[in-house]
Amino acid sequence: MHDSTGRRFLFLLGSTRAGGNTEALAQQAAAALPPDAEQHWVRLTELALPAFTDVRHSGDGSYPEPTGDARTLLDATLDATDLVIASPLYWYSLSTPTKQYLDHWSGWLRVPGVDFRSRMAGRRLWGVTALAGADHSDADPLVGTLEKTARYMGMDFRGTLLASATRPGQVTEDEDAALRAKRFFTA
């Protein structure tokens, strides 16, 4: 049972490498959360999420109830007040595991009785990403995807925390990102 006023953060780690710079940046930001904020961390690559198949135009267009890890992920998503997409920048966009997770939203929108879109409305969506190089505009497509996703779902997009880092551990050298991480969830 959750306190109705408490915040529940779901951190969705989308990197294909454990312990990478994006994950470290998300952990820096999470360290500044108040102690009563719940944190649930999910590494998307550790879930057996089935490939997404678009069946909107087949039969009645509805999707079956998700099972297994897909159901676990749907339940965790619906339980969160705040979703944090922690995806490194891969080819100017989201990582494959992160994109696959968002693709499943298309199916969850059409599962009878789930009411996914109305239940997601009003929740907060955050982004965290590390990218090679100092030109943060390279992440504009990733940020745009998250922003447009939030708008479509009626969610409150709270922005994306960006850091410049390539090699593992290099994010600790981005002092500006460390300062922004400390106040990211309070801004």
Image (cartoon, rainbow, N blue to C red):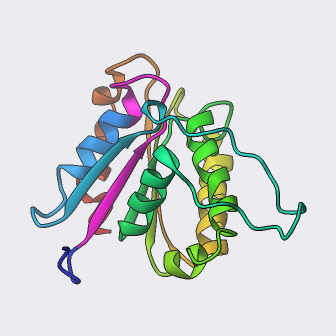
Position above or below: 115 against 53: below
Residue at (35% x, 35% y) in the render: 23
Q: Is residue 118 visible?
A: yes
Near-viewer residue (78 or 156):
78
Position above or below: 108 against 171: below
Near-viewer residue (100 or 169):
100
Position above or below: 129 against 60: above
Position above or below: 139 against 159: above
* Residue 1 in the image, given as x and y percentages of width and height: 19, 73
Q: Is residue 179 visible?
A: no
> Which residues lie in the magenta part?
7-22
* Residue 11 in the image, given as x and y percentages of width and height: 36, 50
* Most distant residue in the top direction: 167
* Residue 22 in the image, given as x and y percentages of width and height: 40, 35
Is residue 89 on the magenta stretch? no
* Most distant residue in the left direction: 35
Residue at (20% x, 74% y) in the render: 2
Near-viewer residue (64 or 104):
64
Residue at (60% x, 76% y) in the render: 117
Near-viewer residue (52 or 93):
52
Quarter location, residue 158: bottom left
In screen coordinates, is 28 left or right of 18? Answer: left
